[in-house]
Amino acid sequence: MNDIYYSAGWNGLFSMFVTLGLIAVAWVLFKEVRWDKVFRHPQSPGARLLQLILAIIVGHGAASFVLDYWNWTSSLRWLFGSD
């Protein structure tokens, strides 16, 4: 039973790192966008907050895809009967 808790703990930690990592990647990529075309003052706190929220949304979406894909590929072993 301890193996299940241990595995669930590592899975949760892995998911957190993937999600936070992809949010950071999205934040870095959004720094390359020319926000002066969208905002009147792109360095204002409101514009930065919107950039952060967009980075969280995009990073979370990418992390959901990566983690779902990881789980799907891990489940393929049950299809072929290997343990």
Image (spheres, rainbow, N blue to C red):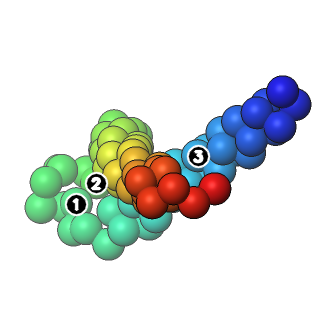
| Secondary structure at numbered mark 1 | helix
Point out the frontmost of discs 3 and 1: 3
Callout 3, which amino acid? Ser
Q: Earlier in the sequence, mark 2 or mark 3?
A: 3
* Quadrant, the N terminus: top right
Tell me the residue at 83%/37% (across/down): 3
Residue at image mark 3? 15
Which mark is drawn over residue 35?
A: 1
Q: CA distance from mark 2 to mark 1?
A: 6 Å
Q: Position of residue 17 (x, y in %)?
A: 63, 52
Q: Nearer the viewer, residue 65 or 17?
A: 65
Amino acid type at mark 2: Pro
Q: Quadrant of residue 7?
A: top right
Residue at 45 percent across and 60 percent down: it is 80
- SS state under label 2: loop
Q: Residues within 10 Å of mark 3 (few under 14, many from 20)?
A: some
**Can you identify the residue that label 2 sits on?**
42
